[in-house]
Amino acid sequence: MDIDGFWELVERSGRETDSRPARSAWLEDHLSGLTAEEIVDYQTWFTVCANRGCSWDMYAVFWTVTGFGSSDGFEYFVNWLISLGRDTFEKIADCPDRILELPEIQRLFELARTFSHERTSRSRNGRFHLKRVTHTRREFWPREDSPDFESFAYVTFDPYRQATGLEPDSLGDAVRAKGVHGKFPFLSYHAAPDGEEWDFGDKDEFIRRLPRLARHYGVTD
């Protein structure tokens, strides 16, 4: 399976189902009809794409939009971006600041307006920081709208077990044997997102790296 075949399956799963559980089940069903080698290929391309989305600027986007920062949460956010399809994923992977162009993100902002319009604040020492999404607001997001898709990364596990009789851990070994090493979860694997690490609370750096997102949240010089 090449990269085009991978994206064809990802996008068909979205067109032919109407919920996330159904989508995962659809992929599992179709992958179960493939050879073990093809299943490894699919997982390899998924890992390549996830690695591409693993950057510090993307982490800042995740941190800002969702209101929390964690290695696992960031991984599930990137999974969700992959689930949106090739054109969308590549656009955001190339320029995380374009996240505002996604109708899915605009939907989340519309839901969030129910709670608060306040976007920024300053601490006692005057240091800038974003007033991020609260836990209550995240709970308000419907499951199908939430920008995370943990199970999207697991659809190869059962098909691989059925095809080989081996546990999913060996699937990771097979992907690494192809020279592809996953970056998620980066805290566990002692890896790091691509690019230069930076302080997301630094107003000037935030404006420089993510000017559109900064404008949306009212971050100014």
Image (cartoon, rainbow, N blue to C red):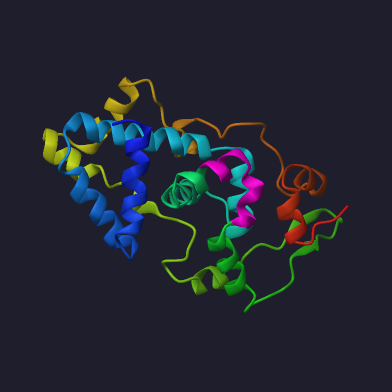
What is the x, y in percent for residue 217? Answer: 74, 61
Looking at the rendering, which quadrant does residue 92 occupy? top right
Vertical relation: 114 (above or below) 71: below
Identified at 67% across, 32% down, the residue is 196
Left or right: where does residue 72 sit relative to residue 105?
left
Foreground residue, 82 or 122? 82
Left or right: where does residue 60 sit relative to residue 30?
right
Residue 188 visible in the snapshot = no
Left or right: where does residue 195 sit relative to residue 205?
left
Left or right: where does residue 60 sit relative to residue 21?
right
Vertical relation: 24 (above or below) 154: below
Q: Is residue 96 magenta?
A: yes
What is the x, y in percent for residue 109? Answer: 61, 68
The magenta stretch is 90-101
Identified at 37% across, 36% down, the residue is 4
In the image, farthest residue toward the bottom: 114
Image label count: 0
Looking at the rendering, which quadrant does residue 208 occupy? top right
- The rendered magenta stretch, by its main secondary structure, is classed as helix
Which part of the image, by quadrant, shows the N terminus? top left
What is the x, y in percent for residue 146? Answer: 48, 63
Residue 76 visible in the snapshot = yes
What is the x, y in percent for residue 20? Answer: 34, 61
Identified at 37% across, 20% down, the residue is 179
Identified at 26% across, 32% down, the residue is 40
Vertical relation: 84 (above or below) 144: above
Looking at the rendering, which quadrant does residue 43 occupy? top left
